[in-house]
């Protein structure tokens, strides 16, 4: 099939402030929901759905992968070597695994977790970038449809979407057993929200972002707005047959989350690229992986020495025990990393993997 000439063009490496800002906000929100002062006191919108459903927090990770896809379309050139793409993908996977080794020390975990956020980002980047370079735009849409429809059919034919009693969880159990991220001793089954099979539809999320990046470069916000409204409607209708579920990364969830991502990208493009508003959040987006990995390491140290608990106790003394104090700790944590990334941008420092 023909190369994706409208997705990856020579000289197409223009940097959009909107993309950096949207990526930065995704990372900042990851930190906000990942590091509360107390997990016993978290506002509902800052929690993932327990199983089926869709909360604002459930949008953060697919939005980040969507922006990864946008960056693929804007940054890769024709003929880019696949070896370079996959070396970067494998570096992301390796960093994710290294972070979990540190987490075993910081959080006193007794089992290594091979899957995780950076591992999924690396795999999705590698596969989506390969497809963007090798397939025509029409073929890319065909791949997206095949992945989502095939995943829907596969789960429906193998038991559906019940917790632990679904194909994704069964594969996690087969691979990891009692060392799965979530394990139920009574049933002997486990689950990992970033497990192997559910990475397949996450690749579709990233490839949708690549198509959005091509539209951003060539057609501007209007196409993104139309796609956003259409994806929201389709994702909602699909949820009547296949529930939104972040843990399983269901196909309806992919389409519905993509709808919101299209609209957010269109909004950021209108405000930051077209109207020239200051791209608030851009500093976090430029060094997104640095902020994510650095905050992880810092959190491991704070947890190991009981400093998260001490910070929550101080906040509770000022604000009263509960959700507000817990949120205050998370806000301070995010503000620290926001300020550090802002200082790095001012110095012109950019760390790439």
Image (cartoon, rainbow, N blue to C red):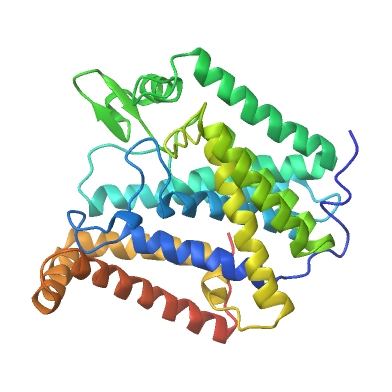
In the image, residue 338 sits, relative to residue 209, either above or below, namely below
**Residue placed most toward the observer, 139 or 295:** 139
Left or right of 136, for residue 265: left
In-front residue for pair 45/110: 45
What x and y, as percent, mark residue 340? 43, 79
Does residue 258 sit above or below 292 in this rendering?
Answer: above
Depth check, front residue: 43 or 65: 43
Give the residue at x 61% y 69%: 20
101 vs 350, left or right, is left
Tell me if I can see residue 326 in this picture. yes
Q: Position of residue 106 (x, y in %)?
A: 24, 54
Quarter location, residue 40? bottom left
Total labels: the figure holds: 0
Q: Quadrant of the N terminus?
A: top right
On screen, residue 314 versus residue 238, left or right, reads left
Q: Quadrant of the C terminus?
A: bottom right
Of residues 154 and 125, which is closer to you in this image? 154
- On the image, the x and y values in percent for residue 297 come to 34, 61
What residue appears at the point 71 percent right and 76 percent down from the top-left corner? 273
Q: In the displayed image of the protein, which residue is found farthest to the bottom?
A: 346
What residue appears at the point 75 percent right and 55 percent down from the top-left corner? 73
Q: Is residue 123 visible?
A: no
What residue is at 22 percent from the left and 51 percent from the top?
107
Q: Quadrant of residue 275?
A: bottom right
- Residue 272 location (% of width, % of height): 66, 77
Does 225 appear above or below 240?
Answer: below
Quarter occupied by residue 280: bottom right
């Amino acid at each position: 099939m023909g190369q994706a000439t409208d997705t990856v063009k020579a000289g197409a490496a223009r940097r959009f402030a909107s993309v950096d800002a949207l990526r930065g906000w995704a990372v900042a929100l990851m930190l906000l929901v990942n590091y509360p002062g107390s997990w016993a006191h978290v506002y509902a919108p800052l929690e993932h759905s327990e199983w089926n459903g869709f909360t604002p927090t459930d949008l953060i990770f697919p939005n980040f992968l969507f922006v990864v896809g946008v960056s693929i379309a804007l940054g890769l050139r024709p003929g880019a070597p696949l070896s370079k793409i996959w070396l970067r993908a494998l570096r992301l996977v390796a960093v994710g695994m290294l972070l979990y080794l540190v987490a075993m020390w910081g959080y006193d975990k007794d089992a290594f977790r091979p899957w995780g956020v950076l591992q999924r980002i690396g795999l999705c980047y590698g596969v989506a970038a390969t497809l963007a370079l090798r397939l025509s735009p029409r073929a890319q849409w065909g791949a997206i449809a095949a992945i989502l429809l095939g995943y829907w059919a596969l789960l429906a034919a193998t038991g559906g979407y019940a917790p632990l009693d679904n194909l994704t969880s069964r594969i996690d159990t087969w691979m990891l057993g009692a060392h799965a991220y979530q394990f139920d001793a009574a049933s002997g089954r486990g689950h990992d929200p970033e497990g192997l099979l559910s990475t397949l539809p996450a690749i579709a999320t990233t490839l949708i972002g690549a198509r959005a990046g091509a539209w951003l470069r060539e057609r501007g916000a209007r196409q993104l707005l139309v796609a956003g409204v259409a994806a929201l409607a389709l994702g909602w209708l699909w949820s009547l047959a296949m529930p939104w579920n972040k843990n399983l990364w269901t196909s309806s969830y992919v389409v519905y989350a993509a709808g919101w991502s299209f609209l957010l990208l269109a909004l950021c493009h209108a405000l930051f690229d077209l109207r020239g508003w200051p791209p608030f959040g851009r500093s976090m987006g430029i060094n997104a992986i640095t902020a994510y990995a650095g905050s992880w390491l810092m959190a491991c140290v704070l947890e190991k020495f009981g400093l998260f608990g001490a910070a929550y106790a101080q906040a509770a003394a000022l604000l009263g025990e509960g959700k507000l104090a817990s949120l205050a700790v998370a806000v301070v944590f995010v503000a620290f990393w926001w300020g550090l990334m802002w200082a790095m941008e001012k110095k012109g420092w950019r760390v790439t993997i």
